[in-house]
Each structure stands twice: as structure tokens, then as C-alpha cells.
Image: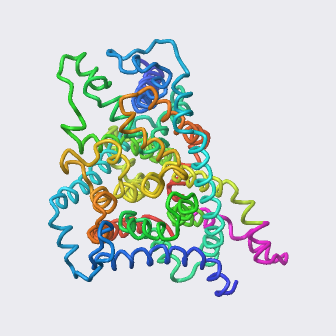
Amino acid sequence: MKRSITRLLMAPSVIMLLVWMIIPLSMTIYFSTIRYNLLYPGQNNFVGLMNFEFFITDPGFIPAVSNTLILLLSVLIITVVLGVMLSALIDKPFFGQGIVRVLLISPFFIMPTVNALIWKNMMMNPVYGIFAWISESLGFEPIDWLSSYPLMSVIIMVSWQWLPFAILVFVTALQSQDTEQKEAAQMDGATGWHIFRYLTIPHLARPIAVVVMIETIFLLAVFAEIFVSTGGGPGYDSTNLAYLIYNQALLQYDVGVASAGGLFAVLLANIVAFFLIRAVGKNLTV
Amino acid sequence: MTLNQQRKLKTILTGLFAWTVALVLFFPIFWMFITSFKTELQAISVPPSLFFEPTLDNFRIVQERSDYIHHAWNSVVTSFGSTIIALVIAIPAAYSMAFFPGKRTKDILLWMLSTKMLPAVGVLVPIYILCRDYGLLDSKTALVIIFTLMNLPIIVWMLFSYFKDLPKEILEAARMDGATPWDEVVKVVLPLSVGAISSTALLSIVLCWNEAFWSLNLTASDAAPLTAMIASYSSPEGLFWAKLSAASTLACAPIVIFGWFCQKQLVQGLTFGAVK
């Protein structure tokens, strides 16, 4: 088929994504250089880099950046490590496999706002929650999760959502593992650990790359869980970049500073993406 | 113990372990579901009550108070609408990239994926202002447009990886028989990839249904989908767990049940064909 026709077929997707990227992004760049507060309309003079200075010196800035990265890395490690281990353990036929699969994937379909509400109230509430009840039954003081360990609480919520996804991807991948190879290794006296280390892990390299890539896309943008459960607090203890910028823009009406923050978030995502797409791109056949 | 017995024991242990993991992970959902049938007093009883007389009052109250049907309809329109539009745009692109790859096809695909890495907060302000200026705040139109663009890269990529695996000989045979490109797509490619297209659509619908950033920031009441309705229950109703659970159950049930039926295709789809 002619080049021109193939281009024509791609055009709508490419053009729409270009527009989606360029227009808002250039507006963000423009807003970030002017004074723009919705409470004081009409005073939109050029201020250079002042918004960036404001954003970077904001007391919430350093916590937000580190919380964003801690959240990303913790959830990635929890879901990938637990996911690989659990999937290797349950990758054998057993009674009721179909039902287990369905139960396992369910948290993935729960919307983030509901996820946060379930955990905040019914699990982590220090008086009536299930966790409090368990620790009291065992004779411990109940913990007020959201105020004592806010970031960890968010990490638990988000991991709960993504662990099932990781497990299912890995289980699906393990089903295509060569059983003859495994049996041959067993004959030669390989232990379970050796089989796991030298056969299973290499086999999972590609699925792990895919899980890391997809999760990163969603984890950098975690918002609803924080919005509903901790509101970024106490202080800035569970504020991530997304939440900090939301706070600047829609609660303090400071569009200029929020735009500067948005650009910073784009920069951070690009740094992460640069390494990630390189690493993952190799693993995806195109 | 004989080898056979050992093997049997292993199967039983694996099963027990898998069931334990699954039940622990599923427990919060189970608890939400149970709580939605309790009275408010039972919902916060310590120790938690497992046996009680179920009541449907909570569901009635939720429907009366926040018009569940209205928000559910918004969720349906925005997720199905944007998915259909995105598919119409993505299918030709994926087809042309899979069957007529050029030198830059891989770059284009990676670029598309990289637009997904662009954090939504980075463009929140301009999108909010554009929506305000065009009167699209709190409108389903805005959400449909945004959801379409949001999922377009993933949809193109997923379709691409399916199309790429279709045997090229079939297309050549069709061409020999004098099929036009249009025939080729409509009569050969599409029928062969019904499964692929539907699992892509499923994933897109799930992602839209659960999308919470744009729906929280751009809608108030008229166009608010279920995600936003639930968020509105977070503070004032925070202590009414039974009603909260009823609202949550109602919000999640459609997509969870939908997901149960197609979890297999979904997982395969989400891995861009990297996992078979």
C-alpha cells in the first residue's frame, strides 16, 4: 500500500495526541511565567522565573518530591517482589483455581476513591477498624494508621490495588514456562531455589518489565487515594507532587505557581520515563 | 511417604496457600459488601459482627440522597463513549503500523506511550481553564474527550501488538483475490481480531470507569461519574459506614462483575502481548 495512505490512517491518532500534548503544555509554560491568581484577575504581568522560585521554596516541595519517589519505589518493590514470590508458589494446579483467580484480581477493579474509603474507615480506623480489632485481640495498642503512618497507609492502599495485577500477569507468564526444562533441572539435583533463581526469574524478565512500566505510569499520578484518605497530611507527610499542585491550583487559586509545579512534575516524569522506556523498550518487541 | 503422596500433599498445600492469599486480598471488598447490609450501629460494633439481620435501607437511602442512577449513567456514557471513539481512531493507526511498518514506527509507538507518562497535573490548569472558557466544566463532553485521549496510546499499542501477530499470508491471499484495502480491514482483519478488540475495549472501559483525577477536578454534580459521587461521601458521611459501604458497593459492583467475566483477556491485553 502507498506510503501516503498508511500515513493518512495514522494521522488522526498522531495529530490528536500531538494537540493533546502541545496545547496544554505550551499554555502551562506560558502561565508559569506570568503572575496569575484567579483571586486577582487582570494582574497578569510577566514575572520570569518567580513562580518556579515560589514552588521550589514552598515548604511542601521537598516532602512532595520525596514522597512521590518513595511511593513509586515502595509500591513497585512490594508488588513485583511479592508478586513474583506468590505467583511462583501458586503456579501449580489446585482446587478452585478459577475462583482464586477471580478473587485475586478483584482489587484491581475497585475505583481509587472507594479503595481509599474502605481502608481509611473499615480497615485502618483506630477505634472501629479491623486492624484495631486485631491488634487489640492480640493485646497491642491499636495504631492510628492515617495520622501516625500516613505515607505508609497510602502505600498499603495502592499496593493492594496493584499486587493482584502483578500476580496475575506473572501467573499467566509462568504458565508458558517450559516444564521439561524444570524437570531436567530437578533430575540433575537442582533445588527449588535454584530453579526459581535460574529458570523462573529469567523467564519473568519481560513480564516484570511490562508490570514496572504500566505501574509507573499510574503510580506517578496517584491522586484520589490521597485526596480521599489523608488529604496530604498531616502537614505534608503524605503530599505527593500531584496533590501539591492540585492544592496550589484549585485550593489557593494560584495558577502561575501551579503551572510551574506542573512543569516540574513533567520534568520528573520525563527523567523517570527516560530510564524506564529505555529499559523496557528493549524488552518489548515492536 | 511415597512420591505420589508427597505430590498430593504438595497440591493441597499449594491450594491452601493460594486460597489464603486470595481471601486476605479479597477481604476488604467482602467486608465492604457485608457492611452495606448492616445498620449503622452494627457497622461500627466492636468486635465486628459477622452475623446479623441484613437490611436494604442503606441502598434506598443512597439512591434517594445522591441519585445513584444519574451518576451511574454518567459513568456508563463517559466510559463507553470514549472507548468507542478511541477505538475508531486507533484501529486504522494500529493497522497501518502493524502491516506497513516504516522506519519510524517504533519511535512513533514509544512517543505515544511517552505521552502517557505526561502527568495529568502538568496540564490540569490549562485544561481546567479551557473547559471553563468553553463552558465545558461539569460536562460529560469534556470527560469523554479527555478519556479518549488518555487511553488512546494504550489502545493503539495493544491493538498494534495483536495485529502484528496476525498471519500476513491471509492478507496477501485476500489481496490476490482482488480485495481493496477497505475490504482487507473490514472483511479480514476485523473479524480475525474480534477477541483482541473486545479485550482492548474492556480494559479501556475499566480504566475510564475508575478514573478519578479528571472526574474529581472537572465535574461537580451534573456530569459527576460514580468516582466523584463516592468522593463526596468521604467527609460528611465518613462516619456513616453502612451508607458509605452501600454507595461504594453500588459504584464498584458493575465494573467488578464485568471484570470477573473477562479477567483473562484483560490481563493478557494489559501486557501488550508480552505474556501469552
Residue B163: image x %, image y %?
A: 63, 65
Front residue of this view, candidates B153 and B247: B247
Residue B153: image x %, image y %?
A: 51, 66
Could you tell me what secondary structure mostly forms the magenta stretch?
Answer: helix
Residue A160: image x %, image y %?
A: 37, 40
Residue that lies at the very extreme toward the right in this rendered image = B177
Front residue of this view, candidates B237 and A130: B237
Q: Residue at x 44, y 34 (%)?
A: A90
Q: How many numbered circles are shown?
A: 0
Residue A275 appears in the figure: no
Does residue A165 lie above or below B91 as drawn?
above
Q: Which residues are magenta?
A: B161-187
Residue B44: within the magenta? Answer: no
Q: Residue at x 60, y 76 (%)?
A: A12
- A235 left or right, relative to B48: left
Q: Residue at x 57, y 52 (%)?
A: B205
Residue B178: within the magenta? Answer: yes
Residue A149: image x %, image y %?
A: 20, 39
Q: Residue at x 27, y 51 (%)?
A: A71
Residue B42 appears in the figure: yes
